[in-house]
Image (cartoon, helix red, strand yellow):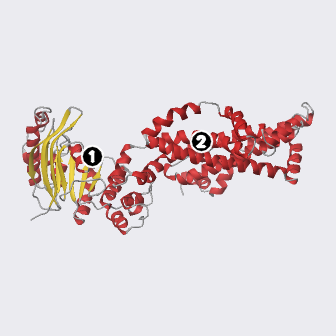
Amino acid sequence: MSQTGLSRAPALLARNRPRAYRRWLRFSHGLWIPAILMLIWQTLSGSGWVSARLLPSPSELLGTLAELVENGALLTHAGISTLRLLTGFSIGAVLGILAGTAAGLSQRVETLFGPTFRTLRTVPLLAWVPLALLWLGSGEATKITLIAIGAFFPVYLNVVAGIHDVDDKLLEVGGLFGLSGSLLITRVFLPAALPNLFSGLRSALTFAWMLLIAVELTAANSGLGYLLTDGRETGRADLIIVAIVVLALLGKAGDSLLQRLKGRLLDWQDVVDSRQS
Amino acid sequence: MPQQLLDLTVTAKSFADLPVLRNVHFRINAGEVVSLVGPRGCGKSTLLRIIAALDTRFAGEVLINGQPPSLRSRDVGLIFQEPRLLPWLSVAENVGFALGIKRRGHPLVAALLSEMGLIDCAGAYPRQLSGDLAQRVAIARGLCSQPSLLLLDEPFSALDAFTRKHLQDLLLSVASRRRTTLLLVTHEVNEAVYFSDRVIVLASQPGRISGEVVIGAPRPRDRRNPKLARKEAKVLTLLSDGTTNSFDLSYALASAPPTWPPVQAAHLHFAI
C-alpha cells in the first residue's frame, strides 16, 4: 500500500462515521458556550458578588425547575401557552396563505387590499395589544386574535412575493400542458411559492411568540407570560429565568420542527443551511 | 395520399408597430419532419408560439387537423431552448406532468424514460442533472402528452457538438417510432438539413418565406452524405437571397475557405 493511501486512511474513516454520531458531534459543539456561561454564572453567584435574589445560581434554578415540574405548574403554563400559540399561529398562517395567494394571483385583489395591508404591516405589532384588550376583553379570543395578527403579515407578504416571483417560463409550460385555473395554482404556483412560504412561516412563528408573551404579560392568569409577571411581582428572579429558559426551548423546538418540515418538502432545493440554524 | 396535419397562414403579425411576419404560409403532413431556418429576428420562434396557441394576436389562420389550436386540446407540444423543468418534481414526475398528478407510475412514463435513456436518473431532481440530461427530460415530457405535432424551438443550441448530434438522432428515432410530426426551428443549417425531410427558409424583417428545400435523403442518414452537403448549399443560397437587406450573408460566404462551393459545405459548421 502506498504512503499516501495510508495517510489518507484516518480522514476516510472520519468521513464514514455514522450519521447519528456526526450529528451528535455537531450538536455537542453548540453546547460549549452555554456550559462555559453556566460555569461563570455559578462562580459569580457562589462567590456572593451578585445578590442571590437578583441572580440565583444555576443550582438554585434547578431546584425551582424541579419544584415547578413537581407541582405541575410548569406543564400547565407551558401547555396553555403552546396551545394558544398553535391556535393563533394556525389561524394567522392559513389566512395569510389564502389572502397571499389571492393577492398574488389577482391584480385586482392586490390593488384593492395591497396598500391597506402594507400600511397596516408597518404598525408595530405590540400596538394592537391595547386595542384588542379593549375590544375583545381579556379572554382567550384576544390572545388568539393577536397571535394570528402577528402570524398573518409575514405569511401574507411572503406568499404574495413568492407567487409574483414564479417564473413565467414555468407558467407557460403549465399552460402548454393544458393547465389553467385551480390546477395551475396547485401544480405550479403553490409549489413554486413554497420556499417563500417557509420563510414567511418562520418569521410568523417568531412574531407569534412575541405577541403571546406580550398579551400574557398584560392580561392573563395562566401561561408562561403570566409566570414572568408573577416572578416580577413576587420578586422571584428564579421563576423569571426558568420561564425564559422554557420559552427558549419551546421556541427552538418549534423552529426546528418547521425547518425539518421544510427540509422534507423542499428537498429538491438542496437546502444546505437548514441544519445550521 | 399523406394526411395534412398543419395548415398555417399568417398574413400579418407585429409586436407593437414592428412587423414580424408577413404572408407566411405552409403546410405540414402527418409524420413529416420539417425545419424552419432563418436569421435571428425572422419570427421563427413567434411562428412556433402561434402554432402552440401561446400567441393568438395575429392576422391569419392556423389549423391543426382542421381545428384551430387551443391550449386545452394539447395537440401540440413545444420544447424550448432551455429545458424548463419544474424544479420541485423528480425526472419521472416531470415526464409524467402532462398526465396529471395521479399518474406517476404510468406505463407511458416508464417507456419514455427508457427510450430516452433516463432510467438511471428517474428519481433525481432537475437541479442534479447536466444540461444534456435535462433537455432529454424535457423532450420526454413533450412526447408524453402524445402531441400530434411536436414543436422544437432550438432545443439543441445549448448543447456541445457531440451531445447535440447524439440527441438529434435519439429524438428522431423516438419520434419516428411514435409517428410524431416534428417542426424544428434552428439557425444551424447543417442541423436543419440532417434532421428534416424539408427545410423552409425564412427571410427577416418582416419574416417571410424565401424558399423551401426538399432534402429527400433516405433514413437513417449518414452525416457525410454528399447529397446533404448539396442541399445545405441550397439552403445557404436561399438564406443569402433573403437576408441582403438586413444581414449580409456574403460576408459569411466570403470568409469561408477558397475551395468553397457545395460539396465541402458539410465540413463547415455554419451558424447564421
Q: Quadrant of the N terminus of chain A?
A: bottom right
Q: Quadrant of the C terminus of chain A?
A: top right
Q: Name which residue lies at 65% across and 57% down.
A: A20
- Three-letter amino acid code at the position of disc 2: Phe
Q: Which residue is mark 1?
A: B157
Find residue A141 and report its horizontal and vertical position in percent: 70, 45
Find residue A86 and report its horizontal and vertical position in percent: 67, 49
Q: Which residue is mark 2?
A: A152
**Which chain is home to disc 1?**
B
Left or right of A216, for residue B90: left
Q: Quadrant of residue B206?
A: top left
Q: Is residue B100 visible?
A: yes
- Pick the front one: A115 or B249: A115
Left or right of B136, for residue A84: right
- Pick the front one: B120 or B78: B78
Q: Name which residue lies at 62% across and 48% down.
A: A91
Find residue B207 and report its horizontal and vertical position in percent: 15, 39
- Three-letter amino acid code at the position of disc 1: Ser
Q: Nearer the observer, disc 2 or disc 1?
A: 2
Find residue B240 and report its horizontal and vertical position in percent: 10, 38
Q: Is residue B86 visible?
A: no
- CA neighbours of label 1 inside 10 A, class few (<14), some (14 to 19), many (20+): some
The residue sitting at the front extreme is: A135
Looking at the rendered structure, the secondary structure element under dot 1 is loop
- Pick the front one: B51 or B151: B51
Q: Quadrant of residue A117?
A: top right
**Which chain is home to disc 2?**
A
Number of numbered labels in the structure image: 2
Marks 2, 1 in one chain: no
